[in-house]
Image: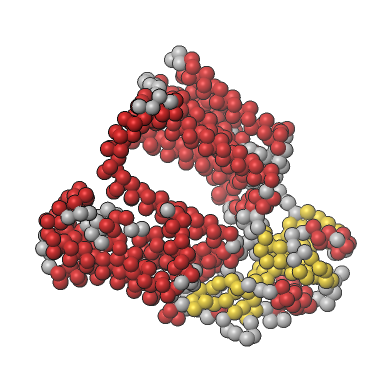
Amino acid sequence: MLQFLQSIVTYIGDHPHSAFIIVFLIAAGEAIFVLGLFVPSTVVIVGAGTLIGMGKLAPVPVFAATALGAIAGDALSYWIGHAYKEHIRSVWPFSRYTGMLDKGEAYFDHHGGKSVFLGRFIPGIKSVVPGIAGIVGMSPWRFTVINIVSAVVWAAVHLLPGIGIGRGIDVAKSGNPRLLELFIVSALAAGAAWYLAKFAFFWLLPHAERWHGQAISALAQRQTPRAALLRRLLENENNILVAFFFASLALLALSGFAMVLAQYLFDPEFVRSDTAISAYLQSLRTPVFNEIMTGITMLGDGVVLTPVAAAVIAALIWHKRWKLSGAVLTAFVSAALFVPLFKSLIHRARPMALYSGADSYSFPSGHATLSATIIGITALIAARDFEPRIRRWIYLGTASAVGLIAFSRLYLFAHWPSDVGAGLLFGGTLVFLLAYLLHDETLVPISKRTAALAAIVLTISYPFHLYTGYATALSRYELPPTEKAISRKDWLSGAWNAVDSQRVLLDGEFGEPILVQTDMDLARAIEKLQASGWSITGAGRILQIADAILPARAPLDQMSVLPLTNSGKPPLAALTSAEPDTAEKRLVLRFWDSGVTVAGASGNSPLLLISTTMEVRDPLPFGYAVMDAAPMTSAESAALAASVSAALGENAIEHDANVGKLFLVPEPQ
């Protein structure tokens, strides 16, 4: 199904003239009486909107075709209902879905004429209500007016979000081309899942009971262990489906941990992505959030979690649940031993030095592992015998607490993203394994008493830990200076080659090449470039993101540059230069922090990196336009590198880097 939907959207993008016919037929098909239940219009129409946002389709014709298709489909459904009346219940294939007709009639009786408008937006109702309007004798003129208005609104509701998604993809693609694949696959997967769920609900479920009985009868005649297991699953004997579900989740979590570990060990891009994402998060730090995140991360400290774990085990022992207490103790001890064992085996350095011994290593995150295990298992036991509504809130609160603790480790630069992911996956494995063991256990009155005891212990240990250790923790998580110092002589004689020669994207891939390295003062470098025709841009990051996604009627020189990053860091400065041959193109020069300082006779100077991209103003209807990235040839890049280095100073040194010409421009001493 996913491949089929992707092929439709891909075909639409490759054949823009056929797109109008396809979206018309899809929009009409979903509105056809009953049969529209099986037409995936939402996926295709939103996909067409995404292609509009990416500049592959014209918006006005697609919008018109979508609205006209929806009008035609509803009109046809109305005519079928008007012509056949109640006799339609005996006509195939409508006779097989009389339950849907009953549901549509009840909806129409409740909402009256406005159900034609409202029903268009409700899955399972939209393909029935127009026909019901015809059956009950709604006026054709009244139906037509409502049909046209609702179709226009429906087309806008489906296309506009897709256009926004497409624009976001186009902007993300400029900074990271592989994000395009991720967005498309994720959107199509979500759409396919939605359609399959709708298909299962409206087509499979009416037949499920009959198939269920036939399958059980067939399996009962087979005397094999596999057949017996399948029969037990189908009959949910001894609530085996729940056990099977938790066992599957435990296996998936453990497999996920193994995949993260393998990616870290064997994929350099994965490691670069860790670094880039971490650096990006550090660029978002503020004093207020530093204080909040420090308090949150202390919730996952051992001095808080250990008393909670002890309280849970004590409650189970007090009620003489020896096997269960042994299983919980085994899970807690396994998590506690797992963390230092793998840290010692992997020996991955933390983003910044925090602890000593095995805790000085980073993979996996102890806070993520232990909070997922201890808080998760505590919630699993404590919520066991509460009513479902309260249980859901307990689980939601637990997931939120564990998620915040995990995020705090990233925000405070205590771990890399893969460390936290691995810890959560291993902790999740232990939680799901215990859920598997508990699936048919009764914990009355243990559950509520355990919840009360754990809450009491937490309300004592956590505030006390904050009171005694907050100031120390806050100072511990202050960012240390991370710049590496090299001598000017070493830089010019070969150390330049150790600095990244391309911009590093958030997923660890490489972007455009670095054209210039210089130890000049940033303000002085900008002044020299302005003298040679470059213009400084001053838009903030939030405004850049908004301008990059939303269409604008501003001229090129008033549009913000695309919000790119290098190793997760935003540029120190961005300058633009309009192309002389067109008013719709410009060059964008960005200064990046290399993380290296150059020691010269006049002191240490930050080593600045310079890269350039080309951006074009892509026009839209009604005078609007969006900003897109355009490729540059290696010859254009080399010529631009020479031009920028000449503007900065005459003492530039040219080198052949792996990706093209690189110029070193030292500050005159």
Query: Which residue occupies the foreground of this view, 92 or 596?
Result: 92
In-image side of 461 versus 497 (left or right): left
Rendered location of residue 199, percent (x, y) = 33, 50
Please give the name of the residue rendered at 48% of the width and 15% of the height, measured from the top-left corner.
322
**Label tally:** 0
Residue 127 in view here: yes
**Height in image: 354 above or below 605?**
above
Please give the name of the residue rendered at 72% of the width and 70% of the height, measured from the top-left corner.
523
Rendered location of residue 587, percent (x, y) = 64, 76
**Height in image: 446 above or below 462?**
above
Residue farthest toward the top in the current orientation of the protein: 320
Rendered location of residue 204, percent (x, y) = 31, 45
Residue 311 in view here: no
Asked where in the image residue 222 lies, by quadrant, the reply is top left
Rendered location of residue 362, percent (x, y) = 67, 40
Query: Which residue occupies the foreground of this view, 388 or 651?
Result: 388
Question: Where the C terminus falls, by quadrant?
Answer: bottom right
Please give the name of the residue rendered at 65% of the width and 55% of the height, measured from the top-left corner.
508
Please give the name of the residue rendered at 57% of the width and 32% of the height, measured from the top-left corner.
370
In-image side of 3 versus 145 (left or right): right
Asked where in the image residue 640 lies, by quadrant, the reply is bottom right
In-image side of 115 versus 284 (left or right): left
